[in-house]
Amino acid sequence: MDSHTLMYGFAFTVFIVLAYRYGRKPILGALDTEIAKIRDELEHARKLRADAESMLEDYRARRRNALAEAEAIVANATLAAEQMKKQAEDDLKNSLQRHEQQALDRIRVAEAEALADVRTSAINLAMDIARKTLATQLDDAAASKLVDQAIADLPKQASDKAAA
């Protein structure tokens, strides 16, 4: 073995001992600091992950609630639309029945008026014919007797018309 090799071996051993004695604490301190930083970052990452999972669950719950609420709104809107449709149909039906009844009433009134007009015309025509006939065939005494009889029959004819 050579003296140089021995010297290098001794210098290396002294270096290792000195490095271990004086460098161990700073190196271990630096490593401990890095380990603490990594632990803090891992803890922070765990907290962020827990927050994210909590937010995700909250979002899912809100989404479920929103979907349930939307379904309820749609169901209520459908029910309201059906009720409005039924109400509109009922209103239309009632309106058509009212219009039909009004038309029938107008027809009855028009028939009654037409019948009254025909009766009036027939009565007027009959009276004109009767006057002409009576004027040519009756004397004053017979005419006076017919007028008295017609006046006596007026209450009976009025009651007959009221009954009709």
Image: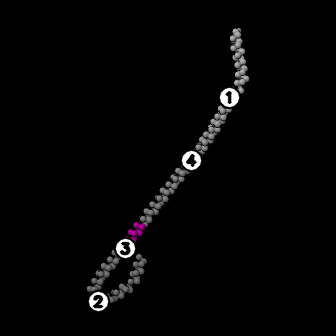
Foreground label between 4 and 1: 1
Q: Nearer the viewer, residue 90 or 48?
A: 48
Residue 104 part of the magenta segment: yes
Q: Which comes before the other along the chain, label 2 or label 3?
A: 3
The correct choice, above or below, for 31 with respect to 54 in the image is: above
Q: Quadrant of residue 155?
A: bottom left
Region of the chain picked out in magenta, as a range: 102-111
- Circle 3 residue: 113
- Circle 1 residue: 30
Q: Nearer the viewer, residue 7 or 86?
A: 7
Check whether the beta carbons of the residues at disc 1 and disc 3 lie within 8 A of each other. no
At horizontal 30% and vertical 81% (from top left) the residue drawn is 128
The correct choice, above or below, for 134 with respect to 46 in the image is: below
Element assignment for label 1: helix
Q: Which mark is residue 19?
A: none
Q: Quadrant of residue 125?
A: bottom left
| Res. 46 visible in picture | no
Task: Locate residue 118 relative to residue 25 in the image: left or right.
Answer: left
Q: Which comes before the other along the chain, label 1 or label 3?
A: 1
Foreground label between 4 and 3: 4
Q: Which comes before the other along the chain, label 2 or label 1?
A: 1
At horizontal 41% and vertical 76% (from top left) the residue drawn is 164
- Circle 4 residue: 66
- Residue type at mark 3 is Glu
Foreground label between 2 and 1: 1
Give the Cα separation between the discs numbered 4 and 1: 53 Å
Give the Cα separation between the discs numbered 2 and 1: 157 Å
At horizontal 46% and vertical 58% (from top left) the residue drawn is 89
- Circle 2 residue: 139
- Residue type at mark 2 is Asp
